[in-house]
Amino acid sequence: MLRKLAAYERQNRLDVALQEIGKIERTLFMLDWLETPDLRQRCQAGLNNSEQRHVLTQAIHTFRQGRIIDRSHEAQQYRASGLNLVIAAIVYWNTVYLQTAVTHLRSTSAVVPEDLLAHTSPVGWEHIAFSGDFLWDKAAASAGRKTLNLSKQARAA
């Protein structure tokens, strides 16, 4: 069927009809967009997550100004896969750390609303040193993860 459609002239009646249907669909979506604040918020949240991941990718991949200059396709795939692996490790670590923080807050009878957690993204990277200066805390290393960074008020409670 796709071959038959591809064999038609560019501006045949079917093509023109499909373009008009596309315009109607776009108009309906734009009206929904204008009338529904929830739709705009969900789309904006998705865009924010994508942009946050892109910024993390740029922060990690600053060597050679963020360009993949390998000549072979296989080497380019290895480099891109390695970058995705590092990003996945950071997101996993942040997820584990956030879960530890939520568990701690709930153990202290603090209210942690689920709707607030739905807007929390594990893509943050401000706490990661990409400069190569690493300070190792032996106590945290033996426990398997970094201790929670609690404020002085929370420690006293």
Image (tube, rainbow, N blue to C red):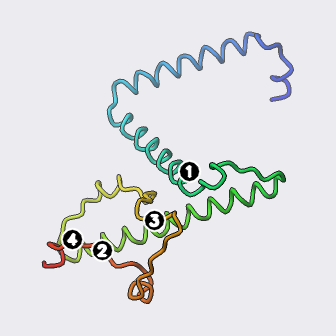
Note whether 4 is above or below 81 in the view shown.
above
Q: Pointer 1: what residue?
A: 58
Q: In this rendered view, identify the residue nearer to me: 25 or 122.
A: 122
- CA distance for labels 1 and 2: 32 Å
What is the secondary structure assignment of the residue under circle 3?
Answer: loop
First in sequence: mark 2 vs mark 3: 2
Mark 1 / mark 3, whichever is N-terminal: 1
Which labelled disc corresponds to residue 43?
none
Q: CA distance from mark 4 to mark 1?
A: 31 Å
Mark 4 or mark 1: which comes first in sequence?
1
Compute the Cα span from label 2 to label 3: 22 Å
- Badge 1, how many Cα within 10 Å: few under 14, some, many 20+? some
The residue depicted at 51 percent of the width and 54 percent of the height is 56
C-alpha span from label 4 to label 3: 20 Å
Q: Nearer the viewer, mark 1 or mark 2?
A: 1
Mark 4 residue type: Ser
Give how far across and how far down residue 123 sits, in percent: 46, 57
Q: CA distance from mark 1 to mark 3?
A: 14 Å
Spatial CA distance of label 4 from label 2 is: 16 Å
Estimate how packed mark 4 is, as few (under 14), some (14 to 19) or many (20 or more) residues with alpha carbons within 10 Å: few
> Horizontal placement of 108 versus 99: left or right?
left
Which residue corresponds to mark 4?
A: 151
Q: Position of residue 113 (x, y in %)?
A: 24, 59
Residue labelled with disc 3: 128
Residue 1 shows up from this direction: no
